[in-house]
Amino acid sequence: MSISVLLTILLIALIPAFIIGLLKARRIAEDNPRAMHSRAGYYGGYLALWTVLPALIFTLLWAVLSPTAINMMVRAELPATVLEHRQGEVSLIMGTIDAVARGLPYLTPAERSQIASDPAAVRDILGKAGVILASEPEPYVIAAADHLNAVRATSRWLMTGIAALLALAGFVYAFSRISAQFRARNSVESVIRAGLIAASTVAILTTLGIIMSVLGESVNFFKAVNPLEFLFGTVWDPRFAGAGEAAEHGQFGLVPLLWGTLFISAIALATAVPLGLFSAVYMSEYAHPRVRAAFKPLLEILAGIPTIVYGFFALITIGPFLRDTGALFGLQISATSALGAGLVMGIMIVPFVSSLSDDIISAVPQALREGSFALGATKSETIRQVVLPAALPGIVGAVLLAGSRAIGETMIVVLAAGIAANLTFNPLESVTTITVKIVSQLTGDLEFNTPQTLVAFALGLTLFTITLGMNIYALHIVRKYREQYE
Amino acid sequence: MTIASTSFNPPASATRADVAAALARRRKFAEWRFKAYGMVAIAISLGALAILFTTIVRNGYPAFVQSSIKLDVFFDPAEIDPSGTQKPEDIRNANYPKLAQAALYKLIGLESSDRKVRRDANQMLSQSVDIQLRDMVMKNPALIGTTQPVWVLARDEIDALLKGSISRDTPEDRRKVNDRQIGWADKLVADGRMVKRFNTGLFVNGASSDAETAGLGVALIGSFFMMATVLLLAVPLGVAAAIYLQELAPKNRFTDLIEVNINNLAAVPSIVFGLLGLAVFINFAGLPRSASLVGGLVLTLMTLPTIIIATRAAVAAVPPSIREAALGVGASRVQTIFHHVLPLAMPGILTGTIIGLAKALGETAPLLMIGMVAFVIDYPTSPLDSATALPVQVYMWATEAERGFIERTAAATLVLLGFMVVMNAVAIVLRQRFMRKW
């Protein structure tokens, strides 16, 4: 039985198991449900869990682990000469064997015997069965494919058999335990609780996964490229393999990318901080509640627009607009200038600054404002000299969060910033960012073991480290600030 | 401090009252100015929003209609079925563009056999006529030998001319449509043979290198598969995790660690999730590139923090008295949560879920990492088939150089924004209708 069928059957088995447990509990209880420790449904649940869960866990484990084991078994049978090939070629051969193995069951007996007698016809016959091979397979491939099919069939039989046994054993065990004194609710609830805990560890696993994958591939990259050259190199020129240059690979200097990233983010923050902060002050201190209720969601729409839309907007509107305006004044502005990308990104992060600042300003105790009014200060004087200084740490936190958003932003810069890695202080020229380079190194059909693609993971690691640092610091500030006024 | 410094050098002749009045005026002006800053800031932000929407609507709405030409195509047996036996191979390999071109020559009254003139005429038709006519005949061989009215697409340059995005005032040698073609196009329009019809192709076609036949079909299906994956995985996982953290978890190092993790994951750049997906799901687990399942998994991990945070807020808003009452009549903690707390928190959870889904629908960067930038012509039938997604389609069209694609890009953006608006509106309505004030 294939895995998906087995899983479906197991899931369906939940229902009869539940019903049987329920009926047995009702029969024990007769007309007096209070004689039972738990309600009848819990006995049904208990029986269903014991029937399905062990078999389910076993099947999933088998599904994950068996391909590796099967692969090793087939590999062990290959001729020694084949295994002397390089790692990449061996896995290619394994791929061919797998493809042939998938095609073999579709052949008629006549075709099978033809394959055995005439190796030259193999490709044609398999081609008719829907398996397209790049080259004529060697004889051992057919043998290995047969072996693979045999092992797979055994594996499936074993899996089905053991799963059925487990289900049966679980069912018998749980069925025998159902009695009036048995605490079914407690057992079922402990399983539920375990499930909830497992769900909450996914967050940790994700973080671990990010760190391991990005770090692991970066280590591979740093085997080929000196980390110091990466961190402090000022030239970004990753020649793609096959350029036929004397140097085996290009130069991977992080500095121009980091500069471009920070430059564009700085322009974005210079746009977003004044806009966001003044909007927040107006919303929380001046605006009529009704105006506030109308305008706040409107501002938040800005945060809900997908970034690709901003990127497209920058590409077709802001870029050409800046270029034409510059031309009026005799300025050469690139259509993909740092300024254009930064401005659009600034618009995007306005709501981050404004809604966070709004919360923080609202959290400043009213007593501080009233004290200031009592001394004769006007509203704006109170805001500038009392409220904002009191809210400053929180606002810094908000700005940091917005900054980390800007640094990690991808689609706006992919469409609206340049691809040339320039080290320039001129916002009218185009610069490029870390995220742009991650995208350009990893899109297209590439091999995953050259420095040219692995560098994307090193860039990702840099990006992750920077934003993580900013986030932790910002969250720390915001939390500390909140506690101060609570 | 400001008050002191501005009031300290009054002119020698001024009286105390004058000084006070001047100072009051200045402070009043400062007050007014400060307030104006706030209004200007809001006006700029909302102005940017308005410009963004108008730009995209202005660029995108023409793509919802498409110029089509009504041809009377004669399905010439000599061309399609020379042997008279309706062999499938003959039908498949027949020269269909020639049939359409013949019909077009008749409409525009073209008799010249000059190859240059003929080529100009041929270039008014979309390349899709070949497949369109072939499919018609393959489906119904009885058409052979008959004359049928068929709506075929015009080439995207002709479409652009009709929509006015190619100006007739540009000199001929710098225009993509020459004077001869303009004349024919005008004749076709005057005869009612060429009209702009609703562009269903935009919603059903797959990838194409010709702007007039490129559509969002594959992207819509891919996005649908991804949203389904997110809904099936992220919602149960997120709600379960949130319940545990908010209701059951003891306060210890482990739960603190989970909490720090969730808060940080919510702020990790989305492209890093793409790198994770590439390394774990594709390179390690061996799932196919470009598959919408992988995209869905990556988006699940990305939306999980959003859903957890929203669910926790919703669960925390249920007053403790509900829990105490349930516990008081003998319910267990788990029963209390599932029978009482969760149903009451449901509107908040749904709102958070929809907002999380909307965010996932618009996300592009991580999908680029896992190879969703693919040229997929056929509909994916399972989540394991190659597919694209709506925002990725926007990205791919945005990087195309041809004029017709700008229109398509804006139209795709409009479709994407339409989904966003609907989802967010549903979330707002849910919040307004079902949210309880305790």
Image (cartoon, rainbow, N blue to C red):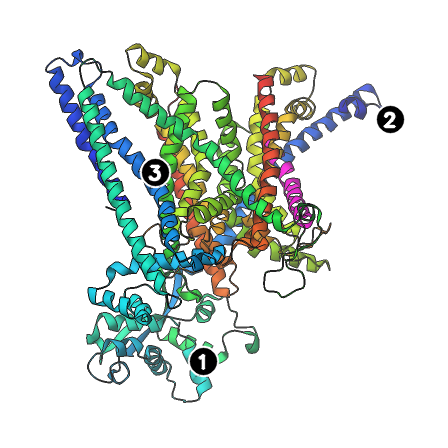
Closest to the observer, B106 or A83:
A83
Q: Nearer the viewer, mark 2 or mark 1?
A: 1
Q: Residue A418's mark? A: none
Q: Give the Cα separation between the discs numbered 2 and 1.
A: 84 Å
The answer to whether mark 2 and mark 3 are in CB contact below 8 A is: no
At numbered mark 3, what does the secondary structure look like: helix, strand or loop? helix
Q: Amino acid at mark 1?
A: Asp
Above or below A274: residue B141: below
Above or below A448: residue B47: above
Density class for disc 1 (Cα within 10 Å; few <14, some 14-19, many ≥20) is some
Q: Amino acid at mark 3?
A: Leu
Give the residue number, with chain letter if any, for mark 1.
B120
Chain label for disc 1: B
Give the residue number, with chain letter if any, for mark 3.
A61
Give the residue number, with chain letter if any, for mark 2.
B11
Left or right: where does residue A195 sit relative to residue A302? Answer: left
Left or right: where does residue A371 sit relative to residue B77? Answer: right
> In the rendered structure, which segment of residues is drawn in magenta?
A253-280
Point out residue B433 in the picture as x, y percentages from the top left corner.
Answer: 35, 30
